[in-house]
Image: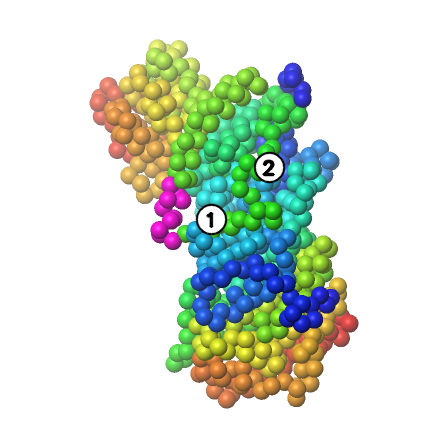
Amino acid sequence: MQRQLTKERIGLTSNYAAAYAAKAADVDVIAAYPITPQTTIIEKLAEFVADGELNAEFIPVESEHSALSAMVGASAVGARVFTATSAQGLEYMHEVLHIASGLRLPIVMATPGRALSAPISIHGDYQDIMNARDTGWIIYIASTAQEVYDTIIQAYKVAEDPRVLLPVMVSYDGFLMSHTVEPVDIYPDEYVRNYIPKFIGNRPRLSPNEPITMGPIATPDWYYEIKYQVIRANKDSRVIIDEVNKSFTERFGNQYDVIERYMTDDADYVLITYGGASTGNAKEAVNKLRENGIRAGVVRIRLYRPFPAEDIAKAVEGAKVIGVIDRALSIGNYIEGPVYNDIASAFYTLGVEKPLVSAIHGISQRAMYINDFYQFVIKLKDFYESKSYPKNPIYLGLRE
Amino acid sequence: MKTYFKTVRDLPREEYFGPGQLTCAGCGPSIAVRWILKAAGKNAIVVNATGCIEVTTTQYPYTAWGVPYIHVAFENSAAVASGIEAGLRIMNKKGLVNENPKVIVIAGDGGTYDIGLQSLSGMLERGHKVLYILYDNEAYMNTGIQRSGGTPHFAWTTTSPVGEVQKGKQQLKKDIFSIVIAHKVPYAATASIAYPIDLANKVKTALDYTDEGPTFLHVIAPCPPGWKYEEKLTVELARLAVETGYFPLMEWDHGKLRLNPPSDRLIDKKNRRPLIEFLKPQGRFSHMTEANIKEMEKEIDAYWDYIVRLMNAFK
């Protein structure tokens, strides 16, 4: 084993970073179907396989439904698997998302987020990811290409832990990250593989040596208990996720938590964000706000499922008002921001009595300007001073 | 077809399909599965599509399966099998395991003709080394008898009811066999549960040829509640389906098409038993008029004509 970590810094899109991470993880089977903005991930992986840089089976399936189904099959015999999709593809897979978690298979999938049809849009937001939030998968949302690379490595460590055995989705901004180049430190494959070794037989698998039945029918007598095991596995995965964040730092240096705090310690106004562009803009806005004497901060949600409610609550302890910026919609809900609703529910349960304001932005990649975030905080301040809060989300960037 | 079994006595005594499952009395598909597993032996992994066989044999915490078994969903068993086959291939190559089980899909007509057609086609096109077995009871029986692409013309189902204006299914049975062989697979065959030796030999032959690529077996398996006949007639109807020419036994073997006994002597229509013998015991056809029966006979003749022309083209 290579004991000394040597990092090589190269320019990668987040999609290529995902592909490099899958290669480093020595995945055995990849099944994928092209869809924007995911496609360059699987193109890169197809090249790695074609060039012999990655010893894997690449199954060019005829649909996303079959992509995830083939992953289920390969994972069921014990293979380490990887796939990627976005938008309509993730919708088409949806049925199998629930099955993958129900069968407790450690599948890892990269999902640059994209708007959903109709009208058809190839551009980025997080509607597809939000529609997958109740499937039992562990869901990370990364904010840099480096984080995409690192999180996919972490994802195998978490997913394959016998205490977890759940599929993991690593999401990030479609286009704004998937197709933009950033500097990424990549690690020698052998070094990564030593961190996430393969253990055949530490989970049930299909083998003629020991026949098992997977995917049986459960009557109402059993279904509830079996699903409850998934609930527990997802909730309890948090322990392993924290362990992995820690061991990852020891091995690779980069530090990760389930949320990222930016200038929250003394912040009166806190923006809660997810993904790259929202967070980057929010941070820039905070810098400018602070120059003008307004104490603002940002909390970025990195781990979306299991939802780090207590961490978020703690991070906003000193805040006067909190704004939640969603890049997705829950149409028909009283407040349409999906993560707003997660936070509202968590805060109510935890007894956090803070004014909470929802903002929607970046739908189908509507341009998000730093000034939008700046002005949103000014609004939060006005609301606070007038003690009057809106009963609807603020639709930033919308032509009304 | 290779001959592995000459008589029933040659079939393995081992049972891989356990008793006590919840199939109906007289279930044709469960007879098919029993023979299939006997012929395949224990070095196999079964992927089962959602359907009658799945719900009746895996009721948690019980299982009827003596071989490794997975059910994922209705439309994707060919894709799941693709992943299993590819997974085992690379794991063997990397030295992670040393196992070479045969991968067998068992799916019904709904899961094959209709909702599973795309994943089946993808699996065949990509050339996965999988034997796909269609057990055809000619409708969605598990959900309570709805018409599928495999349901024959005129047949009553709950979604092709016998009404004042429309009587039974208005369309013909889809020719799945032709669709499969159009993928240029090394081996595809039809079989009937009334001819277990033929069926078992075809399973073994197909499994042999899966080393080259995907293979396919289409097994006719009558269903008492769906076809509306007395349970004791299951095997009899599976035999009459063949003897009347309704369901020819044939095989596509490396680019050649041939009929198997007894269908090989049924090219001459005189040797076929009258279609009415197959139709009459079945309630699903009881509304058919003389004219309907004539029409169905014509359709069967046309299918035979097509088969013979195909045989001549691919000798």
**Disc 1 to disc 2, C-alpha distance:** 27 Å
Q: Position of residue A365 (x, y in %)?
A: 47, 34
Image point (43%, 21%), residue name: A260
Image point (46%, 73%), residue name: B224
Q: Nearer the viewer, residue A334 or A130?
A: A130
Q: Quadrant of residue A311?
A: top left
- The reply, left or right, for residue B95 in relation to residue B138 is right
| Amino acid at dot 1 | Glu
Identify the secondary structure beneath mark 1. Answer: helix
Position of residue B255 relative to residue A49, above or below, is below
Image point (38%, 27%), residue name: A308
Dot in front, 1 or 2: 2
Position of residue A91 relative to residue A47, above or below, is below
Q: Which residue is mark 1?
A: A95
Position of residue A313 relative to residue A161, above or below, is above
| Amino acid at dot 2 | Ile
Q: Chain of mark 2?
A: A
Residue stretch rendered in magenta on the structure: A219-228
Number of numbered callouts drawn: 2
Q: Which residue is mark 2?
A: A200
Q: Nearer the viewer, residue A332 or B119?
A: B119
Q: Which mark is residue A377?
A: none
Identify the secondary structure beneath mark 2. Answer: loop
Image point (62%, 54%), residue name: B42
Q: Position of residue B133 (x, y in %)?
A: 60, 62
